[in-house]
Image (cartoon, coloured by chain):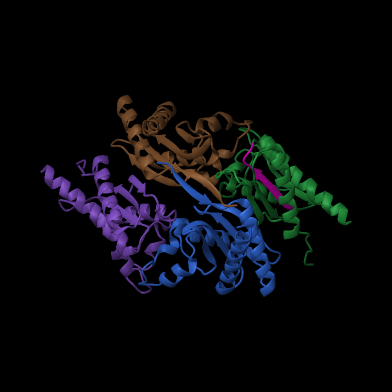
Chain colours: A purple, B blue, C green, D brown
Amino acid sequence: MVLSVKRLSIDDARILLEGAAMKSREIGVPMCTAITDDTGLLLAFEREDGGKPTSVSIAIDKAYTAAGARRPTRFYGERTTPDGPTWGIHTSNGGRFNVIPGGLPLVLDGAVIGGVGCSSGTGDEDEQVAQAAIDHLYAKLNEGA
Amino acid sequence: MVLSVKRLSIDDARILLEGAAMKSREIGVPMCTAITDDTGLLLAFEREDGGKPTSVSIAIDKAYTAAGARRPTRFYGERTTPDGPTWGIHTSNGGRFNVIPGGLPLVLDGAVIGGVGCSSGTGDEDEQVAQAAIDHLYAKLNEGA
Amino acid sequence: MVLSVKRLSIDDARILLEGAAMKSREIGVPMCTAITDDTGLLLAFEREDGGKPTSVSIAIDKAYTAAGARRPTRFYGERTTPDGPTWGIHTSNGGRFNVIPGGLPLVLDGAVIGGVGCSSGTGDEDEQVAQAAIDHLYAKLNEGA
Amino acid sequence: MVLSVKRLSIDDARILLEGAAMKSREIGVPMCTAITDDTGLLLAFEREDGGKPTSVSIAIDKAYTAAGARRPTRFYGERTTPDGPTWGIHTSNGGRFNVIPGGLPLVLDGAVIGGVGCSSGTGDEDEQVAQAAIDHLYAKLNEGA
């Protein structure tokens, strides 16, 4: 009855960080990028030269939220408005539930196996870099397949 | 490969506090004023006679936020509204990300080298005193140049 | 029936910081020094160039403890040993109750009116600088008397 | 009057992580390794496959402590015993002041420019991996010189 779960390896995490760094350089926004496993626990992190000090914990919390809640942080941002369906969720988890765009769950074969969180740019830029990290990993996994 | 960064000295911080105290007396609002380095770490602080007890941590957090996020706290306040682009950022960093006017980054030669945070008056008054602190330092630096 | 309490002014706090800085330079140990009022609330703070980052909160907590508990922090350190009379007090107050030498209450006419906390050197050095700050203030008060 | 300080770059941090991973494989202990800048702020982190979940924050706090307090965490562990000179320091900094072996300051030209923290093995194993990370960076810097 014991479950078997899929989980990001540190090698996968390094590929995700590589993908984030490539996109970050391309758009000229030095980024903080965090990678978590499927439980939201930190696997890897990089603050590029020029990444914002206050974005260290924001990036970590975005990845934590996306992995743990199984949704992009943007999803919650749109619903966490007064009278919205998730109103108040942003102060939960000791304030770590982050609802700013830039956190994405990493899905493999229908299951969430990790999370990616980026911070230092606008929410759109952060999300673009997080998506590029995921696309980079998918491309590498397909090469290997 | 090691980076070389500029950072406020304690002498600079004292000049900033002096500038804040002058403006604070001028407008008749006793102020809490905090000065941080470029990473948001506290360098110097003063609570003038009559400064509000709850403003001690607000001033420190405003300086922390402005230095670390490289923006005036007002910038984030304007965007941290339901559906706004930074909605939710106010609960990040353990609740220390402050979005009330009165925190200003200190910029020298294009780089953020510290932060100034004021609290006890209205947001506009707080920001006015923080700006006066920075203007006072710039004037002193120019005298020395 | 309302009480009248004596409390440090910001001018007194500046004299205390001046006294601390003089002694700190004399012994060649750059210091973090915090001054609180009689309730342990921060009045003034300075981190000298070279003061340790981890000493920011330690200095603030030493002053908080000495003012609030009406005793030198060393007093509690000596008693906060397994089976000692104050065992466990070091984790109270959200972990802010500091029992390392370097925090001193400031006494005037038999009443505690504030606290001084120093950190960055050894406990003995920290306490020496805190004492020098207090001696400097007493000397100034006597001059004025 | 503005100070100029040296700080680890992300490229340096990646070399440190590479050195840690090499030693970690050599001794067969999967490790959590954190790299901070000179103020203790996180620059980079890796949890190798098999690294302990509770070691994520321990590694980060060891690096934070070693960088901020300018000493190996072992130094404080040896002195943070009942009646020891730093007794009580382990609850400071919001509980982040870590006194277990495995955190080392990174020194360049006499100045602390960052910190390395390892956790998942014994304290001795953790410190061995942190030292290997630093030795690896020094070797690379000397190659480049």
Q: Main secondary structure of the magenta part?
A: strand
Q: Quadrant of residue B35?
A: bottom right
Is residue B28 visible to us here? no
Q: Bounds of the magenta span?
A: C114-121
Q: Is residue C115 magenta?
A: yes
**Front position in the image: B32 or B13:** B13
Give the residue furthest to the right: C145
User: Is residue A76 left or right of B66 when viewed as pictured?
Assistant: left
**Front position in the image: D117 or B92:** D117
**Front position in the image: A38 or A100:** A100
User: Is residue D65 left or right of C85 when viewed as pictured?
Assistant: left
Can you say which quadrant of the picture contains the N terminus of chain C? bottom right
**Front position in the image: A121 or C33:** A121
Q: Residue at the spot x=16%, y=49% of the render?
A: A139
Q: Quadrant of residue A73?
A: bottom left
Residue B89 placed where, x, y %? 41, 63
For residue B60, above or below residue C107: below
User: Is residue D136 left or right of C145 when viewed as pictured?
Assistant: left
Give the residue furthest to the front: B145
Residue A85 placed where, x, y %? 32, 70
Q: Quadrant of residue C120?
A: top right
Residue B46 placed where, x, y %? 65, 59
